[in-house]
Image: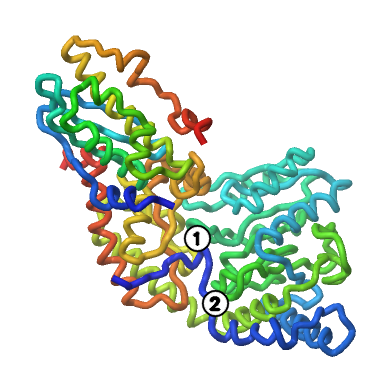
Amino acid sequence: MNKRVYLDYSATTPMKQEVLDAMMPYFNVSFGNPSSIYTYGRESKGAIDKARDIIAKSLNSSPDEIFFTAGGSESDNWAVKGIAYANRSKGKHIITTNVEHHAVLHTCEYLEKEGYEVTYLSVDEYGLISIDQLKAAIRPDTILITIMFANNEIGTIQPIKEIGQIARNNNVYFHTDAVQAYGNMKIDVNELGIDLMSVSAHKLYGPKGTGALYIKKGVKIHQLIHGGGQEKRRRAGTENVPGIVGFAKAVQLAHENLEDHIKHITSLRDKLITGLKEKIQYLKLNGHPTKRLPGNVNYSIEFVEGESLLLSLDMVGIACSSGSACTSGSLDPSHVLMAIGLTHEVAHGSLRLTVGDFTSEEDIDYVIEKLPPIVEKLRQMSPLYEKVKGGN
Amino acid sequence: MYSDKVMEHFMNPRNVGEIENPDAVGQVGNPKCGDIMKMYLKIEDDVIVDVKFKTFGCGSAIATSSIATEMIKGKTVEEALNLTNRAVAEALDGLPPVKMHCSVLAEQAVKSAIYDYAKRNNLSYDGLDGFDPNDEHDHHHDIEEDH
């Protein structure tokens, strides 16, 4: 039994060979520090400039609006803290949601301890915010709206354009964490009215440890990392040249093949959603039926617990994730699943399967074949299942 | 993260199921924490002649239930009451610190079933002193100091 099926593309993706090939020379041949003036340095600097152009173009932004970071979490921290500190003379109120990634949520909680006020918008059963609630939450001292583009757990895509419009009308900055969306949908920052956007390389077949923050020209923001004068004096630290080159290569590939990519993974996603629904009773699809990331499947499988599902699936070579508390070491299940109104036991039984470019039809068939008997075995063991069975 | 023994019991749990006309039934845990254990006992002449369990929970919750049933089968009620969570964890070659609560749950499931037996038969056991089956205290926090 050596078959392995990776269905956790929202956690991270395997790097594409072209990406690895593009990165290699920058480890040991063109290894110079981009800040150095000799040829080695200029080669590295040139590679970064080229990478910045590629990423800027993919977002319909300009290169001087792209700042490289060490990943999505740093970008989120920088955006939220940087805007908060730079605009505190205007106000100390931030609006976000209760389904954000922890990189935004915990940063907001940190700022609350520093005297900032944060409004956490709730979401409906599909994970969508309410535009009316957003409008009502805006105050004269609101300085930032930070709402994720698409949710990492349930895949729900927020009405970004409407949020951008509201932010603009009210003269409030709008940041979005697009770590899951970037590479999986078309993003035009100007059309969508985005002022700041976090992106990450390893979610779109690039390397880990590299990301970027888009900062629209004219946005007032403080630095997060102080030190040398890199990134136009806004983000210190010697640039991760191979990482940045790999990131750009991954973005270029994603951009060129976007339509095919979306078509491919949407069809696999829908096959998985339908196939499991046909074979397993008492399933609840978490997230929105249509406003959903193309590769995301999130099912609550009633009467079973997520970690035992993951362990059993791992035994047959299937890798995926769960919102169960037991997989995180904390007591509570995922805040996202609680926010969409699931009960604890249903949230504990959630399974997230995310497909990607290297997923095949056979992989999906394999999961549809292997998962139902695992669920049945665990349900036979579950005291919560007895009552339901008794009723049949 | 889990020992081979935990995985072995998780994949091939012993004594899963229910007992018809059991002499005792105990249930502990709650859905909020993500684990519920239900234990059924058949007791003859003060000896546990059969035991079955059903568990909703993570891998270690299933493994601790399974091994606990093995450890009390054939034992007297008094002996079963001496089963500690540490003994359960040790029998599984250890549990990760965040999963120690599962061994506490297994110990409590046994006690809860015997409590039911004592109540049905008007018996009292020293090993049940201070045990309250309806105690909703959080077993996760119980063992915090242990690691």
Could you say where residue A387 lies in the image, as x and y percent from the top left? 22, 37
Task: Name the secondary structure under disc 2.
Answer: loop
Left or right: A104 with respect to A151? right
Task: Name the secondary structure under disc 1.
Answer: loop
Could you say where residue B6 lies in the image, as x and y percent from the top left? 33, 48
Q: Is residue A214 above or below residue B109?
A: below
Bin the neighbour count of mark 2 within 10 Å (Cα to Cα): few under 14, some 14-19, many 20 and up: some
| Image mark 1: chain | A
The residue lying at 50 percent from left, 60 percent from top is A155
Could you say where residue B140 lies in the image, as x and y percent from the top left? 46, 33
Q: Is residue B108 above or below residue A114?
A: above
Disc ID at residue B30: none
Q: Quadrant of residue A175?
A: bottom right
Along the line of sight, which residue is nearer the eye, A167 or A202?
A: A202
Left or right: A86 with respect to A55? right
Q: Residue furthest bottom?
A: A39
Residue A165 visible from this viewpoint: no
Q: Are marks 1 and 2 on the same chain?
A: yes
Say which amino acid is labelled 1: Gly
Q: Is residue A349 above or below residue A156?
A: above
Where does label 2 land, which residue? A15
Q: Earlier in the sequence, mark 1 or mark 2?
A: 2
**Quadrant of the snapshot with the N terminus of chain A:** bottom left
The residue lying at 19 percent from left, 28 percent from top is B75
Q: Is residue A347 above or below residue A311?
A: above
| Image mark 2: chain | A
The residue lying at 42 percent from left, 69 percent from top is A6
Disc ID at residue A155: 1
**Quadrant of the snapshot with the C terminus of chain A:** top left
